[in-house]
Image: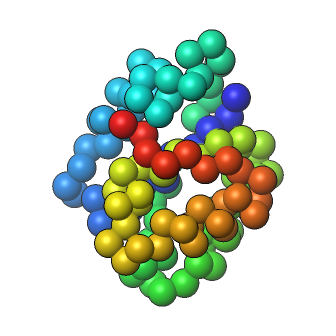
Amino acid sequence: MKIAIGVCEKINGICTTAGCFKALNNKEKTFSRYKDKDLEIVSFFTCESCSNNSDENLIKIAKRLEELGVENLHLGVCIVKCEVHRTKEIKEIFESHNIVVVEGTH
């Protein structure tokens, strides 16, 4: 199964994303749903829709992930707790491209 992880750009220089990868590698937390599945992480990207006031880049990312066959996107806790409350809109962008959005990684 092909998956992707999206995190907030504001964590750059603050977060190592080690928690996301630990949960992924151990198939625990929100990744426990994949215990019996082979996983391929296709993309790890940052969301910057709040800093540029545009969804254009996220739409491009969603289209590309759909082309690559990504089935599920995990939004990091940093996006789930989005300071500008854009989580719903972010989810809708990816869901409109046939990608299941899972809130959280660890």
Q: Using residue 15 as the reference point, say whether residue 61 is left or right of it.
A: right
Q: In which quadrant of the rendered view does residue 10 lie?
A: bottom left
Q: Using residue 30 as the reference point, say whether residue 14 is left or right of it.
A: left
Residue 43 showing in the rendered view: no
As displayed, is residue 3 above or below residue 44? above
Q: Using residue 71 as the reference point, say whether residue 30 is left or right of it.
A: left
The N terminus, quarter of image: top right
Q: Position of residue 63 (x, y in %)?
A: 74, 62
Identify the residue at the far top of this view: 36
As displayed, is residue 57 above or below residue 77? below
Rendered residue at 37%/67% (across/down)? 82
Q: In which quadrant of the rendered view does residue 18 lie?
A: top left
Residue in the foreground of this view, choosing between 36 and 64: 36
The C terminus, quarter of image: top left
Q: Position of residue 89 (x, y in %)?
A: 57, 72
Q: Position of residue 74 (x, y in %)?
A: 52, 45
Residue 71 showing in the rendered view: yes
Q: How many numbered circles are shown?
A: 0
Q: Position of residue 58 (x, y in %)?
A: 60, 69
Rendered residue at 35%/27% (across/down)? 22
Q: Using residue 83 as the reference point, say whether residue 96 is left or right of it.
A: right
Rendered residue at 41%/60% (across/down)? 79
Residue in the foreground of this view, choosing between 81 and 71: 81
